[in-house]
Image (cartoon, grey):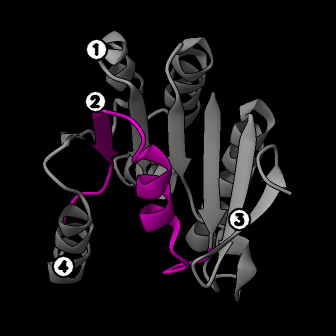
Amino acid sequence: MITLVTGGVKSGKTAYAIQLCGQYQFKTYVATAEAFDDAMQNKIDLHKAERDASWTTIEEPVSLHSVFDNAEKQDVILIDCITMWLNNLIYKQLNTEKHIEHFMERLKSCKKPVVIVTNETGLGVMPANPEGCKFADELGKLNTRLAAVSDSVIFMISSIPLFIKGGKK
C-alpha cells in the first residue's frame, strides 16, 4: 500500500502523514532533508518534535532506495520528503534518473505500507531562473510517477485532506 501526501508549503502534509501512520507499532520516519542553513535546521527540529518515541528515524538524503533494506522489520515507512530528496540529487549533481529508477523499483516491490510526502511546486509563481524551472518540471514528473503507482493520493489544503485517489471520497 503506497500513499502519496502532496500539497503546498506548510499545508499540513507531514502532520497528516504522521497521523496516517499512528495505527502502526513499528514506524520508520525517513528524513531526506539536510540542514544547509539555520532555517532548514529549524524546520528539521520542528518535524522531529512532531514525532514521539515510537518512531525510528533514518536520515537518508541520497540513497533513498536503501531504506527498504530492513523494511521487513517495520510496520510502515514514512518518507519525508521527495521534494528535498530530488533537490539533494540535483544539487549534488548525481545521476537523478538512475536514483529515481532504483527508488521506484524498490518502492513498487515493498510489501509494507509506505507513506510518501511531496510538494506541489507548480501551485505558485514559477521560478524566474532556469534551474528553478527545471526543478519544478522534474518534481512534477516524479510526482506523476509516484501518483501512478500509489494506491492513495491525498492533497493537503490548509491541513485539510482532499482525497484524490483511493481512500475517502
Residue 15 is left or right of residue 63, and the answer is right
**Quarter of the figure with residue 163:** bottom right
Sequence-wise, the earlier of marks 4 and 2 is: 2
* Marks 1/4: CA–CA distance: 30 Å
Q: Which secondary structure, mark 2? A: loop
Mark earlier in primary sequence (2, 3): 2
Where residue 133 appears, x then y in whole percent?
67, 70
Name the residue nearer the viewer: 60 or 48.
Answer: 48
The residue lying at 72 percent from left, 35 percent from top is: 150
- Answer whether labels 2 and 3 touch (C-beta < 8 Å): no
Q: Nearer the viewer, residue 41 or 99?
A: 41
Residues shaded magenta: 8-36
Q: Regarding mark 1 in the picture, which secondary structure is present there?
A: helix
From this view, report whether residue 113 is shown above or below residue 33: above
Q: Which residue is denoted by mark 3 in the rendering?
A: 155
Q: Please report contact status of discs 1 and 3: CB closer than 8 Å, yes or no.
A: no
Q: Residue at x 70, y 86 (%)?
A: 124
Mark 1 or 4: in front is: 1
27 on left or right of 6 = left
Is residue 71 placed above or below 87 in the rendered structure? above
Viewer-closest of 96 and 114? 114
Depth check: 2 or 93 in front?
Answer: 2
Work out how far the residue at label 3 is from the one at label 4, CA to CA, in angstroms: 25 Å
Image position, residue 130 (x, y; %): 63, 72
71 shown above or below 21: above
Residue marked by disc 4: 42
Image coords of residue 147 (percent x, y):
75, 43
Residue with the mark numbered 2: 26
